[in-house]
Image: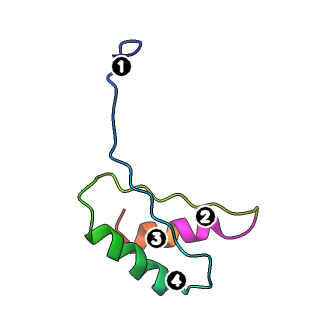
Amino acid sequence: MLDGQAKVAYNVHKIYVPNEDLTMDQLLNYINEKLAKTTSRPFIIAIDGMCGSGKTTLGNYLANELNA
């Protein structure tokens, strides 16, 4: 325990999405394939990009489609 709080450990698996043009459906299919192959929960998706590049839009789309 650190400072009276329980330490939480996650089994982290990095998934690299190729830097190529993907449709939203292609990206969703790619993520679903990776989800099907892991039993680790929670499944965390990090989205990186410049200001105004659509990170929030993509995150909202994925959250909705993945029922997260």
**x, y percentage for residue 8?**
33, 32
SS of the residue under disc 4: helix
Is residue 18 depicted above or below 11 in this figure?
Answer: below
User: Which residue bears the numbered disc 1?
Assistant: 5
Is residue 58 depicted above or below 51 in this figure?
Answer: below
3D distance between C-alphas at marks 1 and 4: 39 Å
Q: Residues within 10 Å of mark 2 (few under 14, many from 20)?
A: few
Sequence order check, earlier mark of 1 and 4: 1
User: Which residue bears the numbered disc 3?
Assistant: 62
| Type of amino acid at the residue the image marks with label 1 | Gln
| Residue 24: assigned label | 4
User: Which residue bears the numbered disc 2?
Assistant: 56
User: Where on the picture, by quarter, is residue 51?
Assistant: bottom right
Closer to viewer: mark 4 or mark 2? 4
Sequence order check, earlier mark of 1 and 3: 1
Sequence order check, earlier mark of 3 and 4: 4
Is the stretch drawn in magenta largely helix, strand or loop? Answer: helix
